[in-house]
Amino acid sequence: MGIRTEECCPMNILEDFGLRLKELRLRSNMSQDMLAARSGLDRTYIGSVERGVRNISLKNIELLCNTLDVDISYFFLHERFSLHTASLKKELERPLRERFNYRVDPVYNVITWQVTGGISRDEIRQIVADLKSACLQLVSGKVKLLIDNRKMMVQGQPIVFQQEVNEKWEELQRWFLPYCEQVVVLCNSKLMQNQMNRLAKRSGIIKVQKSLFAEGEAWLSEDPDPCSFFETR
């Protein structure tokens, strides 16, 4: 988050911080009430921080970052997002097969899956069961996962997983860990890359996982060979 001077922009540091908080809250599809409940802070306090009328302590910044599942250092990066609400209600009306698909390559011990929209708490349970079943078809300890989240978008805006869905991904990663040799996650933003790295550290799969992101439209649209992402061992 660059420092703005009064000459180039009338926004002060509290307003800038508040906008950044709102951006990340909306990208995570959280309401102020939801963020308040999960962080342990008061909703009116969060509202006043977002409006730039209240100072905030470092301790509360840490609480909010942990609730949004981002590092404090990421919070202050230049990556910015639209303030339009990333509502998943209409998105989740699309058939799941349009938002999630996977394939198994037993020759190379690779499972590739792609997420192209939001995933609900109920849907993640079936997805987890399907992916575990797919993994058990392959050679244990040699499984490679390519997870493509680049097209996780709502109304042209990148989104990240909701907290309850992330909890299920974390459980799945712990289950996958003894089976996996390499894991590659393709991300739609630095926000997602940061979130995926935090998730991988908690689950322990960070030992074999790389989370990748590159700037530019080409990154979001190219269709690379899955095996090109894995190291030859």
Image (cartoon, rainbow, N blue to C red):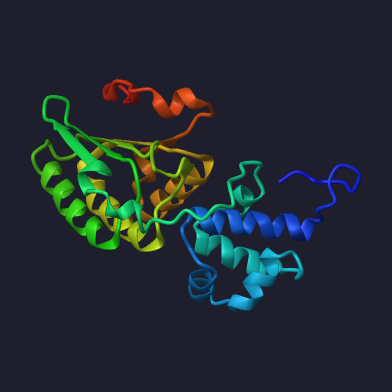
Residue 8 in which image quadrant: top right
Residue 233 visible in the shown view? no
Question: Residue 205 appears at what percent x and percent y?
Answer: 34, 47
Residue plotted at (15% across, 42% down):
135
Question: Whole-percent x and y of residue 163?
Answer: 40, 61
Residue drawn at point x = 62 percent, y = 51 percent: 75
Q: Residue 147's spot in the image, x, y percent?
A: 31, 38
Seen from this angle, which residue lies furthest right? 7
Rendered position, 204 above or below 60? above
The C terminus lies in quadrant? top left
At x 71% / y 69%, what residue is drawn? 57
Total residue callouts: 0
Q: Nearer the viewer, residue 100 or 111?
A: 100
User: Horizontal and vertical percent for residue 2?
Assistant: 75, 43
Q: Identify whether 208 is placed above or below 122.
A: above
Relative to 160, 5 lies left or right = right
- Residue farthest left in this picture: 137
For residue 140, above or below residue 120 = above
Q: Is residue 144 left or right of residue 218?
A: left
Where on the picture, by quarter, is residue 114? top left
Viewer-closest of 68 and 59: 68
180 to the left or right of 18: left
Closest to the observer, 152 or 183: 152
Looking at the image, can residue 139 be seen? Answer: yes
